[in-house]
Image (tube, rainbow, N blue to C red):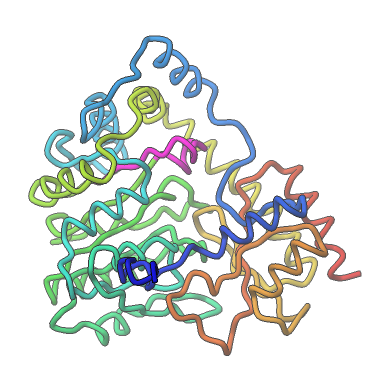
Amino acid sequence: MTESLLAARTGQIQLPVFREIAALAAQHKAINLAGGTPDFPAPAVVKQAAAQAIEADLNQYALSHGVKELREGIAARIQQEHRISVDPDTEITVCCGSTEAMTAALLAVINPGDEVIIIEPAFTIYAPGVILAGGRPVPVKLEAPEFKLDSGLLEQVVSSRTKAVIFNCPHNPTGRVFSKEEVAGVAEVCLKYNLVALTDEIYDEIFFDGLAPVRLWALPGMRERTILINGLSKTYSITGWRLGYVIAPPVFTQAIKITHNYLSLSAPAPLQTAAVTAVCLPQSYYEELRRTYQERRDLLLAGLNRLGFSCLRPEGSYFIIARFDQFSRQDDLAFARLLVKQVGVAAVPVSGFYTQPESKDRSFLRFAFCKQAETLVAALERLQQLVS
C-alpha cells in the first residue's frame, strides 16, 4: 500500500554495490581495498587549519557558493597549472563533495527526457544523478581489457534528445588517462552536436609516469560548453570533509548556484576555510603526492601480477582493475563476496560500474591502493591463499 506513495524515480536506482562490500568487510574484519578512502593522515597543516577555524568560531553558514578565499585559491591553482583564468565570483561554486557538485550541475542543465551519454564503466553516481534530474542515461562501453575510448561509439548513440556527455579522466575504475586523440574525439562529438560536457576531474592531481591528463575543457571550443567537476577529497586525503566544486561558464554557474543552494545551502564553513590552506600548498606537495602514489601503485600491481591476476596498469587515479578468471569462474560479485569471507580482502566488482552489466564477462575486480604500504603488503599476503 505505502509503496504506491513512493516517487517512481527511486525504483530506477539502487545503492551502489560497494556499500554492500564495505558492510561485509567490516563484518568479517577484512582488509578493505574496495573503497577509495585513504588509511593514512591528511596533511598536518590542513588539519591544524581546520582546528583553528573551529576555535575561531567560523562555525556558521558560509556564503552559499563558497568562501571567497577558497574560490580564489581554486582559481589560482587553475592559473598556476594551466595558465587559464577562472573568475572566482562568476565561474566557481563550492559544493558538499563532488557528488553533490555533479548532481547540482545535472539539475541545472538536464530537462525531463533529455539523454546523457555516460562512458562505462563509470563511477556509480552518474546514472542515478541523470535519473534524479529526469534524464535518461545512455551508456557507451569502453572495450575490455584495454578500455580504450572510441569516439565513433559516442556518435552512434547521439539522438535528437541527447543533451550532454559525462567524461571522467583520470578514469575510475580503470585508471586510464585517455590520450589526446581520445579526448579530442569527445570534444569533436560535443562540438558537432552542440552537447554539454560534464567532466569529472576528481583525480586530476594523481597521475603516473609523467602522463599528465589532457583537459577536455582546455581544447578549442570546449571552454564555453564544459562543466568541470572536482573536489578536495582525493588530492588532500580528506574524503570525509565533503568539499567539492564546479567550474563553469557564468551562464551555467548562475543556474548551478541555484540548484546547489536548494540541495545543501552551503558546504561546512570551517572546513572550507581550512581548505584554503590545502589549495595553497606548494608545487612540491603535488609532486610528492604523485611519487608516493606511484610507489603504492607499483607495490600492489607487482603483487597482484605475481599472484596470477591479469591487471591493467593504471596511468592515473588510485585504482587497479584486475581480472580474476584464472582463480574462479564465478561472477565478480560472487567472487568479491568470497574474497571478503574466506580470504579477508575486500575489492569492488566492476559490474557495479555499469548501468546494465553484461553477463558474458564479469571477471574484473577493482582494488584501491590509497593505503599505507603495510596495508597493501598484508592484503597481498592474504591473497596468497588463492594460489595456495
Judged left or right of residue 104, residue 356 is: right
Residue at the spot x=61%, y=55% of the render?
368
Q: How many marks?
A: 0
Question: Foreground: 302 or 265?
Answer: 265
How far across and how far down the image is residue 200, in percent? 34, 56
Residue lying furthest left in this view?
A: 251
Majority secondary structure in the magenta region: loop
Residue toward you, 115 or 325: 115
Picture coordinates of residue 32 (x, y %)?
68, 52
- Kindly indicate the quadrant of the structure image that contains residue 346: bottom right
- Residue stretch in magenta: 232-246
Q: Name the quadrant of the N terminus.
A: bottom left
Location of residue 331 (image quadrant): bottom right
| Residue 319 vertical placement versus 56 (above, below) | below
Q: Quadrant of the C terminus?
A: bottom right
Task: Tell me, yes or no, whether the highlighted magenta stretch contains residue 227.
Answer: no
* Residue located at (21% from left, 69% from top): 164
Query: In the rendered view, does 267 fall on the left or right side of 27?
Result: left
- Which of the two residues, 203 or 346, is positioned nearer the viewer here? 346
Residue 240 in magenta stretch: yes
